[in-house]
Image (tube, rainbow, N blue to C red):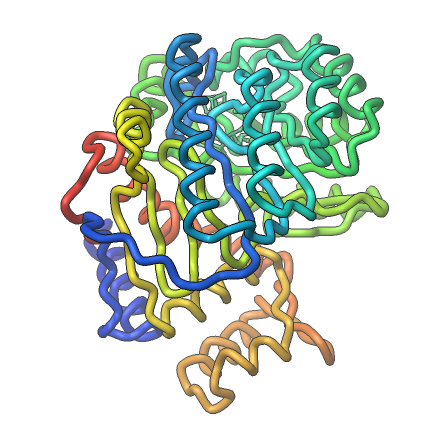
């Protein structure tokens, strides 16, 4: 079955992107940076006090001494990019992880340096977890000028928190959420997970209702992705838990979509829904960005770079005054536009003017994609935009499973084992 799926995947990939595009990350021998004037900054803080078994991200157990060394290293990295690019215009800063608030004091120093070396004029977003939140953490986030916060709640029910190995109790969540909401950030997002082991539709509705009752107005719902290299497979076997199948996931997605729309929310990405005027919280939709921290990626015109995933090697490199970039992939024009299209699908709409600019309107392959999508009611359109329908969103979710997460899985699992891989073919 997986050979068959791989065959379809590879054929579709060469059909759209072209066989001339090499899908290969290679060890970086010399680093060339294209000219950019305006970028996002992504800061990867790879520490967590508790390591969740399902988690695919590059993170290690929090360690005070290592966190101190990491801080020194990231300050050198900021300095190096400043030397390379000068005082770059930074349109937004995203602090992800791991759990960035594990290093709440260090973050003050990091952001001070970022502001000193770059011209930051956009929002500053951070991810956090309920067990990290208390008044002093919230006050510090405000003091640092952080404008958008995302809390990884996952579920409001102890049985599911336990099933996925989260270490806090559901009873703590209302006061945590209230504390963050009362602090007057521009936007507060909450992550919930569905398709959890043993979860039924009623359980999903329970979590959605709880989130809405707590006055959350920006909610992102992810199905539990099982990455082969995370320990969730083994963990589920030990616990003898049952995962919902694709049919149930389809019903869950529709339930979530209809629930939010019925409660005055609108869809702002395949996974996220928001209500009212608060700005959209998003981690992934910047055009170009520079990644700082162990395992961070940079996406620049024509090229992707990945820092080494090893925290020790990351620190080691920067201590020696070397950028910790391990691998790169050249992005040919054909891939760049499908990459752009992928993220517009994630946004759930495609602006037609930009689309026409990037794609030749006579590009038969592209027209085929669009026409087929319309026949199967995956898209709708008006004068300005092509919109993804609810059904279309579900298919993007499946595509994410089969393409993107598969690539992420390959690259990340090799990069986590080998700090300086020679080559990763995807
Ligand atoms: C890097 S985590 C950051 C938040 C924080 N570390 C936490 O866990 O609360 C970002 C979000 O990714 C989602 N996530 C993590 N692993 C996932 C998986 N295997 N499948 C689906 N979503 C996942 C969770 O909803 C989580 O809140
Ligand atoms: S899910 Fe969040 S808290 Fe858990 S290990 Fe991953 S990054 Fe850390």
The one of 116 and 285 positioned closer to us in this rendering: 116
Residue most toward the bottom? 362
Q: Say above or below: 361 vs 337.
A: below
Horizontal and vertical percent for residue 276? Answer: 85, 45
Q: Quadrant of residue 419?
A: top left
Residue for point 39% across, 62% down? 34
Residue most toward the left? 422
Q: Say above or below: 128 vs 333.
A: above
The one of 221 and 182 positioned closer to us in this rendering: 182
Residue for point 78% across, 32% down? 185
26 displayed left or right of 276:
left
Q: Quadrant of residue 55?
A: top left
Res. 398 in view: yes
Horizontal and vertical percent for residue 371? Answer: 52, 80
197 displayed left or right of 187:
left
Residue for point 68% across, 31% down? 149
Res. 160 in view: no
Q: Say above or below: 266 vs 160.
A: below
Horizontal and vertical percent for residue 357? Answer: 55, 81
Horizontal and vertical percent for residue 121? Answer: 69, 48
Residue for point 40% across, 22% down? 70
């Amino acid at each position: 079955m997986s050979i068959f799926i791989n065959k379809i995947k590879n054929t579709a990939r060469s059909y759209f992107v072209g066989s001339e595009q090499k899908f290969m990350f290679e060890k970086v021998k010399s680093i060339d940076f294209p000219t950019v004037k305006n970028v996002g900054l992504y800061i990867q803080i790879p520490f967590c006090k508790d390591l969740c078994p399902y988690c695919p991200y590059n993170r290690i157990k929090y360690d005070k001494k290592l966190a101190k060394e990491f801080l020194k290293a990231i300050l050198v990295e900021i300095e190096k990019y400043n030397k390379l690019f000068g005082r770059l215009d930074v349109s937004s800063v995203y602090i992800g992880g791991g759990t960035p608030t594990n290093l709440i004091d260090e973050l003050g120093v990091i952001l001070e340096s970022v502001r000193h070396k770059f011209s930051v004029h956009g929002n500053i977003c951070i991810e956090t977890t309920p067990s990290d939140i208390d008044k002093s953490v919230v006050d510090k986030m405000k003091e640092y000028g952080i404008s958008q916060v995302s809390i990884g709640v996952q579920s409001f029910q102890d049985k599911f928190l336990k099933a996925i190995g989260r270490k806090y109790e559901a009873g703590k969540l209302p006061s945590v959420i209230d504390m963050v909401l009362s602090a007057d950030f521009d936007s507060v997002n909450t992550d919930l997970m569905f398709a959890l082991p043993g979860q039924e539709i009623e359980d999903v509705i329970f979590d959605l209702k709880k989130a809405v009752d707590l006055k959350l107005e920006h909610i992102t719902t992810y199905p539990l992705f099982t990455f082969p290299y995370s320990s969730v497979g083994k963990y589920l076997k030990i616990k003898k838990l049952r995962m919902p199948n694709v049919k149930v996931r389809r019903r869950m997605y529709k339930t979530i979509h209809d629930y939010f729309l019925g409660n005055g929310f609108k869809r702002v990405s395949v996974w996220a829904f928001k209500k009212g005027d608060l700005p959209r919280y998003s981690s992934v939709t910047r055009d170009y960005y520079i990644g700082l921290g162990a395992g961070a990626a940079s996406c620049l015109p024509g090229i992707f770079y990945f820092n080494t995933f090893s925290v020790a090697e990351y620190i080691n490199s920067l201590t020696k005054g070397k950028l910790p970039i391990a691998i790169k992939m050249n992005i040919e024009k054909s891939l760049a536009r499908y990459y752009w299209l992928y993220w517009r699908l994630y946004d759930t709409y495609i602006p037609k003017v930009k689309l026409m600019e990037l794609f030749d309107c006579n590009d038969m392959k592209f027209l085929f994609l669009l026409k087929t999508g319309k026949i199967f009611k995956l898209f709708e359109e008006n004068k300005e935009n092509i919109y993804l329908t609810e059904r279309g969103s579900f298919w993007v979710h499946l595509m994410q499973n089969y393409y993107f997460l598969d690539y992420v899985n390959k690259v990340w699992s090799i990069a986590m084992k080998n700090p300086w891989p020679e080559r990763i073919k995807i």
